[in-house]
Structure formats: structure tokens, C-alpha cells
Image (cartoon, rainbow, N blue to C red):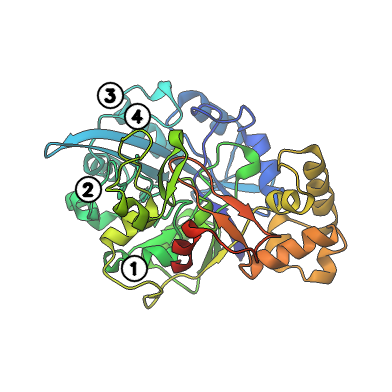
Amino acid sequence: MEFIADFHIHSKYSRATSRDMNVKNLAYWAKLKGITLMGTGDFTHHLWLEELKHNLDDCANGLYKYNGVYFILTAEVSSIYSKRGKTYRIHNIIFSPSFKTVDKINEKLSRIGNLASDGRPILGLDAAELARIVFDIDENCMIVPGHIWTPWFSLFGSMSGFDKIEDCFEEQTKNIFALETGLSSDPRMNWRLSALDKFTLISNSDSHSPQKIGREANVFNCELDYQTIRDVLRTKDRSRFLYTVEFFPEEGKYHFDGHRMCGIRWSPKETKDHNGRCPKCGRQVTVGVVNRVENLADRPQGFEPEGAIPFKRLIPLDEIIADAKGVAKTSISVAREYQAALAKLGTEFDVLMRLKKDDLLKGLSPKAAEGVLRVREGKVDIKAGFDGEYGIISIFDANQTPDKNEEQLKMF
């Protein structure tokens, strides 16, 4: 069966998350979005784990279910540690096939750090050692390095990461077969590194609020069970992993370089021209994803490796409606049109990817319907995100002349 999965989210027990991130609301919003399979997130936190065990029904195939929505047991661990004289900050997503395995993982990790301090615990644990611990407990687990290009907390992060996967995971590299691209990069950018060809690229929302689940996701056509999904990811099976759903990566918070406090947003060329220093305060700017990809790439822009999983770029429906109305996406009028549209048209992914214009007009304003069609065609204008600031999207001014920063975006 074909279904959409979002593996990476956080519960209400993680820092800077909505109090609405509970099982009931996750299932409610998953249905609105059209998501069949959700990651639980945060299974390392004892209170969230209690809620999961209390609310989820065991499907006896490595997945769990609540009110018609399937769940897979996941958690993100932040590893901060020193190695060969440098400090690294790496985020990894752990997938578990059962609560029994989760309990064993938590028992082991609790000896290393305080799992109760945050839904995404911070441990002074080498990423390779984390992998060894998890796979020694259950070889059917999966570890996926999270948002691998984010500057401060990721595998390839410009401020805290490695240049090679093997340097991070050492002998455990053989057990890593999937990578999460993150909001600030898309597969095409990752295809420029031949070293990533053997890995399956996945995309997830990393959501901290229910409304944002599914902003990136994965579309499968396979059986809904843990081992099948693991096998699809392990083998990079294009017949069963159909495509990923992506942000326009320019919208991500770390696409370009810059210094948020001083309002500096630069392309890699501008960063080079300024020797990487902010002209206002003199500090080093945060080097973003485009720059980091360019530094590590061994292929030209536009290269597509054989066997790559396809992708589609989308913009969330509430953002499209907000742009059509000329108001903030948090406006009550946006929420009303969003809910009314889905009541008539189906799920958000139906609206964004499947319905034709005539059908869209049955539930959306003409301008919002036009916005959906423009997004499908890639007719958007974006001021790239930088140093923790999301990019600014304009759908209805897409024909305006881009400023000098946007010229760099055309490469992607």
C-alpha cells in the first residue's frame, strides 16, 4: 500500500516544543495532513514513554497504532563529545522495533546521562559508541544521522561536524544505511557527494508542534511493518520508496551563511569576499548548508546518481493560504480557510500534490488554488534562511527581479 511517513518529531517533553505534542493531537493532525505513519519521537523520556505505552496498541509487527494512525518508536539523541582534540555535536535518530528494546536502550543510556532532563537528551557519548550500544542491544534497530548539514548539531555541520561519515561512526559505519537531509538541504544538493550514494536519503519534519508535522516526509509503497520499512531503507528500493517530500531548501533556517544578530545574510561567494567575518561586529558568520555542500562536493551542480530516490518540493498549505491573503500564517482567517478546505477536499497532501485545479477551486479561494499550482511548478521566490532564521517565501511576486543574494540560489 502507498503511504506517507514522518519519522522525526518531538514530544511536549522536549525543549521549545508545543504542549499540544501528545498522542491524541499527533494522530488528529496526521489525519488532516494525510500521514499514515508517525515517528513517536523522544522514547528516551520516561514520562513520554509512559504515555506511549498507555495509548498505543501493539500491531505485533514492530509498529503501533492509535485512532487509525500508525506509529514507529523513535528518539533523537544529542551527542556532545571530544575526539582527536575537537568537540563534536551530533544528532542521531534511533528507531526501535519494540518497547522491550526501548527499555533496554534507555536502561543503558541512563547510566551515561540524565534522560529525564529533556525529550532529546544530551549525552557525552561518541556517536560510534552510541551506535555500538544500540546495535548490541538489538541489531534490528536503525540509527539515522539527523539533519546532516545543520551547522551546530549534525554529522556534516560546519561548526561541529565531520567531513566523512567513517570518521564519525568508525567501524559502525557499516550499520548506517540512511541519512536525514534536513530542512535546509534537499536530495539534489546531497547528490553532489559521491560518498553518499550508498545511503538512502530520508526527509522528516523534525516538528515541535502538531501543525508542522509532514512539512517534510517520505512516500512508500510497501507493507506497513517495521522490518519491511527497514529493508526498504537498507536496500534503497526505488520500487517501494517512491519519493521524499521536501521543503524548498532555501526556506530552511541554515541554507545561507550569515549573522542573525547583525542581519547579515550571505551567499558563499559573499562570505568568501568578506573572509567569513561580519562587517558589523567582526565575528565569524555561521556557515550554512549551501557553503558546506560546496566545500565537500566532488560533483557538479545538477548531477543525479543512478538509483537516486526522487523528490518533490512543496510549501505547507497554511503558508500558501497566508500568502494569498497577504496575512501571517498564524492569522485566524488562515486557520479557518485551511480547515474549511480540508473538510471539502480531503487531506493536505491531497491538496498539495494530487487535486486538479477544478477540484482545488471547490475548497480554496481562486488565489490560494493558483498558489498551490505555482508551488507545484516551482514558481516561488525565496529569500534564503540563515543563522537560525527561516527563509521568506513569496509565491505571488515570483516574477520580481531577485536581489543579488538570490542569484546563488539558482544553482539549486
Residue under circle 1? Answer: 192
Would you call the spot at circle 1 few (<14 residues within 10 Å), some (14-19), or many (20 or more)?
many
Secondary structure under tag 1 reads loop
| Nearer-N-terminus badge (3/4) | 3
Residue 168 tag number:
2
Identify which residue, 21 or 194, lies in the foreground: 194
Q: Distance between the residues labelled 3 and 4?
A: 13 Å
Secondary structure under tag 4 reads strand
Tell whether 369 sits left or right of 89. Answer: right
Tell whether 136 sits left or right of 114. Answer: left
Secondary structure under tag 3 reads loop
At label 2, the amino acid type is Cys
Q: How far apart are marks 2 and 3 (CA)?
A: 22 Å
Pinpoint residue 142: horizontal percent, then vertical percent: 37, 50
Question: Which quarter of the figure is the N terminus placed in?
Answer: bottom right
Residue under circle 4? Answer: 122
Disc 2 vs disc 1: Cβ atoms closer than 8 Å? no
At label 1, the amino acid type is Arg
Identify which residue, 285 or 75, lies in the foreground: 285
Tell whether 59 sits left or right of 85. Answer: right
Mark 2 or 1, closer to the camera? 1
Pinpoint residue 174: horizontal percent, then vertical percent: 24, 57
Would you call the spot at circle 2 few (<14 residues within 10 Å), some (14-19), or many (20 or more)?
many
Residue under circle 3? Answer: 111
| Nearer-N-terminus badge (2/1) | 2
At label 3, the amino acid type is Arg
Residue 36 seen in render:
no
- Locate residue 82: give its quadrant: top left
Residue 45 tag number:
none
